[in-house]
Every structure is written in structure tokens, then in C-alpha cells.
Amino acid sequence: ERIFGYVAEEVLGKPLTVLMPERYRDAHQRGLERVRLTGESRVIGKTIEVHGLRQDGREVPLELSLATWKTGKGTFSTGVARDITERKQAEKTLRASEARYQNLFNGVPVGIYRTAPAGQFLDVNLALVEMLGYPDREALLAVNAVDLYATPGDRKRWQALIEDEGLVRGFEVQFRRYDGTTVWVENNARV
């Protein structure tokens, strides 16, 4: 009643399609017909996402588990529906937030990266890819940050600072570019 806006008595005895938008009705009818003709139960083995149709004509996103079977009295369906409106809104908000993050991450004119402690790149922005002359983001992600340091001792000094202080500011160092040349960078990082 809460999800669909009906009082139970308004839909009891009516076909399930009264609770479905038009686009789902044909598939449901075909499923019922298959059960009627074959006598086999039709069970959706996993929860699926569909839209229900409220009494006021608005659609509501649902997770649905449905089973259909045939008896001597007819073909029947039983189901469990859960309103996922809040989850869908949260997913939409998350997608928008991720898009803003990606636009910021990729739009700033400085190289930004995330690495694991051992130096594996977890993420790099396009400015860093361009700065280091890599053909694309994936090529740079395949490199270990340790290998970018022109002088291995510089990486060890940087690693000691980040481990001791959790923050490195203004660390000037030479990085190897994709073509083997070097470029001076100012590396600022924090744990």
C-alpha cells in the first residue's frame, strides 16, 4: 500500500499488470503464457530492478523477486518488491559527485597522482601524463613511481620524509619522462 498508493482491496483480484508501467506488461504476459502452456514454474532467480506504477500514475523504482506457477485454478505470481527510490537518488548523487571529482582531477593544470606505499600508481591525471610525455593514462599507470626518479636516492629521501612526517612539501627532484629525458618537478605529497 505504501509503495503503490493503493489500499489492498483496490488491487486484490486484479492482474499484476495494474502495478506495472506499459513497457513491462508484454514481457509479463509472455511469461504467464509460457507457464500456462508448459506448466513449468517461472522463477526469476535473482532480484531485478524494474519500475512499478503507483495509483497516481507515477513510476517508482523497485527491486523485484518474482515467481510464477500454474495450478488447476490458474496461473499465479508471487513477488517481493522493495522501493529503491532513496538508493537510486543516492546513486545519482554519487555519479554527479564522481563526475565533479573527475572534472576537477583531470582539469587542473598540475600533475596529480595517487600511489600505494610501494609506488604502484592508483590514479594519475591528464596533466601528469602530458608532463611526463606518456602516450596515455594507462601507460603511466603501468609504471611504478619508483622508476620515475632519475636518482634512486631521491626516492628513498622522499619515502623517508613521507613516512616520518606524513607530508612532503617542495621536494624538488628530476623525473624520467617516457622518452628517457628528465624534467624537474616539485613534488608535494601527503599520506
Image: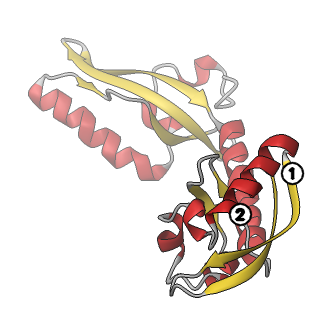
Q: Which residue is mark 2?
A: 154
| Label placed on residue 79 | none
Which of the marked residues, 2 or 1, is nearer the chain's N terminus?
2
Q: Residue at x 64, y 69 (%)?
A: 151
Q: What's the image's color scheme?
A: secondary structure
In the rendered view, does 48 fall on the left or right side of 180? left
Residue 110 occupies quadrant: bottom right
Dot 1 falls on a residue whose secondary structure is strand
Q: Rate crowding at label 2 as few (under 14), some (14 to 19) or many (20 or more) other CA atoms within 10 Å.
A: some
Residue 65 place in picture, x, y as percent: 42, 26
- Vertical comparison of 77 with 53: above or below: above
- Vertical comparison of 5 with 160: above or below: above
Q: Residue at x 52, y 84 (%)?
A: 180
Q: Which residue is mark 1?
A: 167
In the rendered view, does 64 fall on the left or right side of 113? left
Nearest-to-viewer mark from 2 and 1: 2
- Vertical comparison of 79 with 137: above or below: above
Residue 78 place in picture, x, y as percent: 40, 19
Residue 47 occupies quadrant: top left
Q: Amino acid at mark 1?
A: Leu
Q: Amino acid at mark 2?
A: Asp
